[in-house]
Image (spheres, grey):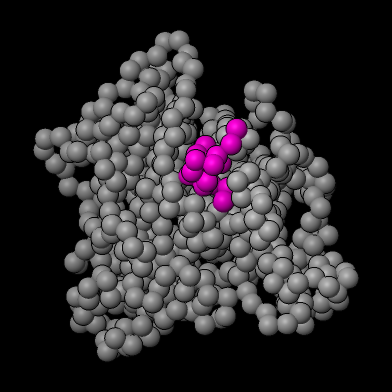
Amino acid sequence: MSDGGRTFLLFLAVASCQLTLAPRLRAADDTVTIDSGMLKGERSGTVVSFKGIPYAAPPVGDLRWRNPRPVETWSGIKDARVFGPSCMQTDDLPKSEDCLTLNVWTPVKRPRTPLPVMVWIYGGALAQGNTPQYPGGQLAAQRVVCVSMNYRLGRLGYFAHPALMKESPDEPIGNYGYMDQLAALKWVRKNIEAFGGDPKKVTIFGESAGGGSVMAHMISPLSRGLFRGAILQSPDLPTARAESTPLSTLKEAEKTALDYAASLGINGNDAEALTALRALPAEKLIEGASAQEVLAGMSTGKPVIGISGAMIDGRFLLETPEAAFAAGRQAPVPVIVGANDRDLGIGQAATRDDLFALFGKHASEARSLYDPSGQQDLDELKQQVVADKTLVEPSRHLADEMIRAGQPTWWYRFSYVAEALRNDPARKGTPHGFEIPFAFDIPDALVKDKVTPADWAMATLASAYWVEFATSGDPNGGSRPKWPHHDPFVHRVIDFTNHGVTFGADPLKPRLDLWERYWEEQK
């Protein structure tokens, strides 16, 4: 859910960088051949990009609310120098229901051995998001192949009308956005060698609902074997706590779809109702379903009509991540996971009493931890409590479970604030999504011409950890500060701070321990 970072996303742009080349390099061509045809890309500095590549057939007409179908081949050379339209959403940007495209950035010069691959999944509450916001050129300049994909959103991406089950009884139903992501990962396995990438060295990474998507692929049997590493930045929808932001059951999702159809005057659960739904303009299906409205609905317990979000469909998702992790049924891959120090939370409270009532019988202890003087501003208290509940403690829980399963895991907190933003009295830390420019090595996307050498240094450092993890399965290397494995018995954390990277005891540990006890008691 990256709406907290939408301000900086408006200013994203690729920055140039210098690449020190190793011996035995070969030049990359800006024309490549993949399984569906030839592509013409565009060189920029040390990187060549290929944009708007179809990875599945357009999900329109009778393919609306169907799993992605193979893309048709084309003759000649397809121009791949412009991003494809984004998937349908309320944001004012170029968009279309015909949106299943992806983008690839690869070094102009690269070693003869295939390069590791980083596949980005954007966030946005499964209701908004687009790939032009996240240019991968700066990562590719660090000698990886970077990929991003569009996937269906909102009522077009997560919808489980009962007629769909009758139409396609042998297919996964409902999680069409996840199935799009799966199709893109299969495309990577089949085609990435043409761009110099190694299909056996794929790392998937994402933020918010994109991080939640990474988690979904970690536990889905359909995604097994398509990646060897996972980076989850403030993962949500789902989280590692089943009750924090619950997944819908298929039965609940079917009722949501039926209620929405009825609100449009379309009744019944047969093929006739499905035909009527498919005849609706795509613009109609996104009304009232912005990411902000979706998040508000989740916070108040009054979801936007027709929005079920991700669901346990019995095919792609068989269970909650928490259940899968407890049983060790996740992909056995190395993991980086963490959250920001001013991250997003889902929930509401009109008073202090309402807020601390979230802790049930632990309300008194929560007061002593979060508001020992009784003088804390209510809005500040809400930010801390709901962020810990929704994102921070669940990220630690995920790290704990991965270590217990024997998977190399690194847990982080991101609290670096760009220097140009530090004089803002309202800026008390790093909001949801504001770590992304540093992970992508594009801090100028956040503050434009006010970017400073310190900002660039933090971006160089953070992105180097991410790239090295994708390269070797371990973020450590070079002269970077040592990042030890997560220890569930000590709970030290690496923190990307205004004073550099630190590693030590987590100051939030008492608060997170309280949430841990609360969640464990709910089982």
Residue 364 in percent (x, y) is at 86, 76
Q: Visible in this render: residue 364?
A: yes
In the image, residue 82 sits, relative to residue 434, either above or below, namely above
| Residue interval drawn in magenta | 434-453
18 to 333, vertically: above or below? above
Is the C terminus in the top left, top right, bottom left or bottom right quadrant? Answer: bottom right
Measuring 52% from the left and 46% from the top, which residue is drawn there? 447
- The reply to whether residue 198 is visible in this rendering is no
Residue 448, percent from left and from top: 49, 43
Residue drawn at the location 64% of the way across and 77% of the way down:
348
Number of on-image labels? 0
Does residue 384 belong to the magenta stretch? Answer: no
Please give the name of the residue rendered at 37% of the width and 34% of the height, measured from the top-left corner. 105
Nearest the camera: 193 or 413?
A: 413
Please tell me which residue is depicted at 73% across the width and 82% down the height of the picture.
Answer: 351
Is residue 440 covered in magenta?
A: yes
